[in-house]
Amino acid sequence: MPHTHRDNVVQAARSFLFVPGDQPARFDKAVDSGADLVVIDLEDAVAGDRKDRARAAAVEWLSHGGRACVRINDASSPLYGTDLDALAGIPGLVAVMVPKTDSPESSTAAAERAGLPVIALIESAIGMVRVHDIARTPAVARLAFGHLDYALDLGADPGWSAMLHARSSLVLASRAAALPGPVDGVTTTLDDAEALDGDLRRAKETGFTAKLLVHPKQVALTHAAFRPDEETVRWARRVVASAMGSSAVRVDGHMVDAPVLARAKAILQRAG
């Protein structure tokens, strides 16, 4: 599918804030949190007997000025097609998040039915094995990691050491497919800023550039974590300025070649 402004929004976002689809009173509050992209959840956050109500609320809000991504039910659910049909053509829909993505075909089908870019949520061993093919699918604008479901599928611990290979695989697949860094999974401890800070630090070190969030209080810390610090920004500015009109320069005693210049420009872009 062609490159669109909606792709740009998805690819630049640092924070993806979930809000349950059956709680429409919270939609505007989620927007007011300052999250880069609100994700109305029709899947895990909504009980089975409230799915229709959640879908209708999402369509109503997105049709009257609201703007968000929607996480639909997965392709094995009978609600998958119903969700996509209801969302097709809705003006405020930015993207579709497809849970339990396990093949390029599932992403392509979702994009074609909704007419929108897809965030492929990798949550299974099969999805991880196929992640490079999924990342190269034209419909996919971003990869995201559902580490809790992934750990459950493997029968593994969801901690960082056990999930490091999977996280690195998503980073590698994203880079090879020329996608932005992937979106890391949620931190479920809501009142422990230290735990969130640790998760963000490790995610950034691994190569992630965004995070799935479950509460508005997590937004500010997430943005701060993925924003380059002032010293790094000053270095990037010196590199870019020094490289103007010269093919070989030195900054702070180090040679500036094409990869260094590209890194500096990327830092300035993330800094806004």
Image (cartoon, rainbow, N blue to C red):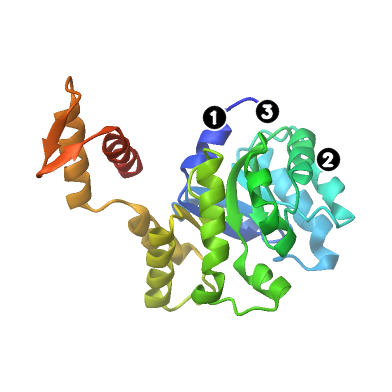
Give the image quarter of residue 268.
Answer: top left
- Distance (Cα) linking label 1 and label 3: 12 Å
Query: For the point 30% across and 36% down, which residue is it?
Result: 265
- What's the residue type where badge 2 is placed? Asp
Mark 3: which secondary structure?
loop
Location of residue 7 with respect to 61 vertically, above or below: above
Location of residue 109 with respect to 186 vertically, above or below: above
Whole-percent x, y for residue 127 in the image: 71, 56
Q: Tell me if mark 3 has few (under 14), some (14-19) or many (20+) residues whose alpha carbon lies within 10 angstroms of its own.
A: few
- Compare residues 208 and 128 and report the one nearer the observer: 128
Label 3 belongs to which residue?
1
- What's the residue type where badge 3 is placed? Met
Of badges 2 and 3, nearer the viewer stands: 3
- Distance (Cα) linking label 1 and label 2: 22 Å
Q: Is there CB contact under 8 Å for labels 2 and 3?
A: no
For marks 2 and 3 on the same chain, the one whose residue lies earlier in the sequence: 3
Res. 44 visible in picture = yes
Mark 2: which secondary structure?
helix
Mark 1: which secondary structure?
helix
Q: Tell me if mark 1 has few (under 14), some (14-19) or many (20+) residues whose alpha carbon lies within 10 angstroms of its own.
A: few
Left-right relation of 74 to 3: right
